[in-house]
Image (cartoon, grey):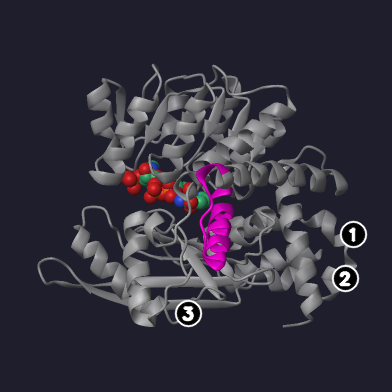
Amino acid sequence: MSVISDVIDKVKQTDPGQKEFHQAVIEVMETLEPTVDKHPEFVKAGIYERIVEPERVIIFRVPWTDDNGKVHVNRGFRVQFNNAIGPFKGGLRFHPSVNLGIIKFLGFEQIFKNSLTTLPMGGGKGGSDFDPKGRSDDEVMRFCQAFMRELSRHIGPETDVPAGDIGVGAREVGYMYGYYKKLKNEHTGVLTGKGLEYGGSLIRPEATGYGTVYFAIEMLANRGLDFKDKVVAVSGSGNVAQYAIEKVNEMGGRVISVCDSGATVIDESGIDMEKCCFLMALKNVHRGRVSEFAEKYHAACFDGKNVWDVIREQGIKVDIALPCATQNELDAQNAEALVNNGCICVAEGANMPSTPEAVRVFRENNILYGPGKAANAGGVATSGLEMSQNSLKLSWSREEVDNRLRTIMKNIHNSCLDAAEVYGKKGDYVSGANIAGFVKVANAMLAYGVV
Ligand code: NDP
């Protein structure tokens, strides 16, 4: 038995219920096989066994009161996974599906993603099973304050720097940062994704969506292709999806889909900038549903359906797919339909949106496939730039941050390809991203000895 399969077996035995975490560990570990032969020192130092075990897991009670005075209790999580190359860093997710296995999968992925950015950030993730949908601003504020009351004991600008994720945007970050400041009497860069007025960075809201498109641009360029006149399917309609749509438009592509957990909208005439602005206001200000978008623009609306199911069932041809909603949204059947209809490129704005079987379909068919930990790393990279600006106590211009983001995405793309080639997997972005991210963290862990 190899060290890799031993580690996978142990994870499954130790945490039997954590299926998303198992999926993430298997996906990474299986591609690390070539590093085992090349680095006997990693095996000797137990790096493979140690990297799948979080440094620390914090689970806490979050009691809060709704507008009618009723008391609710949610569960809060922070998984501080690995701080070998910098403070723990990773978002907070507020969604009813949140559990320890999901937070561990996200935290584990974050280790390699953050390493790929070349910035000094370790991996972590957190969140709660709280659902902000349908809650008033006051209720969301009280929840965020209750959540921060406990989280504040465990984070700090040099220790652990959370950010947003699903269900945590500018509003939630504002409430949490305000409460942290109140509790600690400190104005420090303890969260990223902050408002511009209180330490946020220009381009941070745009960064994950823009970065995903920048990564796709690099992959396409490798085959002499670009976004011009391409039909692009996007899933989701939140932060990542919105700015991916904006950037695709800028690059001359035509986006034909969005979704939320209620419905999928197909708009074959293209979601142009006017429609994209409407979508942003609908989602970020009015907190509405994509079905209202369909109504306004007379687009097709499929209730209760996911984008990739609709694209398969309707036989819609797309050139480029950008899954930007959630984990495991795109399965093998849908991947086959995309490939059979001529899709050339998939870049993941979301974390682990393609099932392992779907990934196999993309890889076997030689599709340009950019896994989330590489393709969506622009968000955390720009969070890293926000941390730098906070430390320097200055703010960079929009152009400066965007140029840095563009360069980082290009470098991530190239380091994936370089690592893939060095470890005998030429052209394979999955192996390249995992290996490049892993080797840097492993070397740092090696340097520290057994700690
Ligand atoms: P948001 O909360 O802003 O948006 C999430 C979107 O996905 C919403 O439209 C939501 O619909 C939809 N969605 C969620 N679950 C489902 C589901 N089961 N079926 C269909 N639609 C669903 O989150 P983000 O845009 O920030 O995050 C999207 C993805 O990108 C996540 O995987 C996240 O981890 C990843 N990511 C985010 C980064 C960031 O900087 N924000 C950085 C890197 C990765 P509804 O409104 O109905 O809930």
Report, in whole angstroms, how far the alpha carbon at label 2 lies from the one at label 1: 9 Å
Q: Residues within 10 Å of mark 1 (few under 14, many from 20)?
A: few
Q: On the image, numbered disc 3 is attached to which residue?
A: 154
Residue located beneath label 1 in the image: 38
**Amino acid bearing label 1:** Lys
On the image, the x and y values in percent for residue 248 come to: 51, 29
Range of the magenta residues? 378-399
Which residue, given by chain and number where applicable, does mark 2 sit on?
Answer: 41
Tag nearer the camera, 3 or 1: 3
Task: Using the numbered discs, state the Cα–Cα distance from disc 2 to disc 3 in whole angstroms.
Answer: 33 Å
Judge left or right: residue 51 versus residue 186. right
Residue sitting farthest toward the left: 68
Question: Which quadrant of the structure image shows residue 242?
Answer: top left
Name the spot of residue 329 as percent of width and height, x first. 47, 42
Q: What is the secondary structure assignment of the residue under circle 2?
A: helix
- Residue 262 in view: no
Label 2 within 8 A of ligand 1 by Cβ = no
Kindly indicate whether the residue at mark 1 contacts the one at mark 3 (C-beta within 8 angstroms).
Answer: no
Where 101 sits versus 424, above or below?
below
The image quarter in which residue 411 lies: top right
Left or right: 10 as drawn, with respect to 94 = right
Q: Residue at coordinates 50% horizontally, 27% vertically from top-left?
A: 250
